[in-house]
Amino acid sequence: MFCEGRTEYVSREHCKLYKLRTLYLATQNGFGIMCRLPTRDISHITPIVAGVSGGVALIAVIIRCIYAVGTFQVDDMSAVAAIAIAVPFGALEFALAADGFGKDIWTIPHANIYRIIKARASYMPKNLDTNRC
């Protein structure tokens, strides 16, 4: 099923655990739907964290630039460049939360799941776990 035909070097125990974890999650999702359990929704956390930490960082860079008037150096430019790169990623968290990032996956429409995965994969490191089944 999961491990047949794979070329990775994976132990049998790892494959068994992967199968059990997948079965557990599928069972948990089905059980939650059938029994009408309340869905988990922590989609408000990432925008709050991104907004607060990004806002504090932006204020710190603005204060730094105000005090560096006339003596703007490379370190000041690096801080401005870092905040300019970080702001779009912080804004992306708001869009992902609106699409359903942080909710139980069976409650999210398929189109939104695709957008979430596509957006997260665009800036997440690749090939972190090479021992997958």
Image (tube, rainbow, N blue to C red):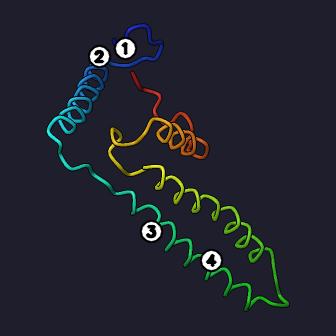
Mark-to-mark CA distance, 4 and 3: 15 Å
Amino acid type shown at disc 3: Ile
In the image shown, does 127 or 27 lie closer to the viewer?
Answer: 27
**Nearest to N terminus: mark 3 or mark 2:** 2
The residue pinned by badge 3 equals 48
Mark 3 secondary-structure assignment:
helix
**Nearest to N terminus: mark 4 or mark 3:** 3
- Specify the quadrant that holds the C terminus: top left
Mark-to-mark CA distance, 1 and 3: 40 Å
Image mark for residue 3: 1
The residue pinned by badge 2 equals 12
Instruction: Looking at this view, name the residue that lies furthest to the top.
Output: 5
Check if mark 1's residue and mark 4's residue have beta carbons within 8 Å. no
**Nearest to N terminus: mark 1 or mark 4:** 1
Check if mark 1's residue and mark 2's residue have beta carbons within 8 Å. yes
- Please report the residue visible at 44 percent of the width from the left and 12 percent of the height from the top: 6
Instruction: Looking at this view, name the residue that lies furthest to the left.
Output: 35
Amino acid type shown at disc 4: Leu
- Tag in front: 1 or 4: 4
Mark-to-mark CA distance, 4 and 2: 49 Å
In the image shown, does 34 or 8 lie closer to the viewer?
Answer: 34
**Nearest to N terminus: mark 1 or mark 3:** 1
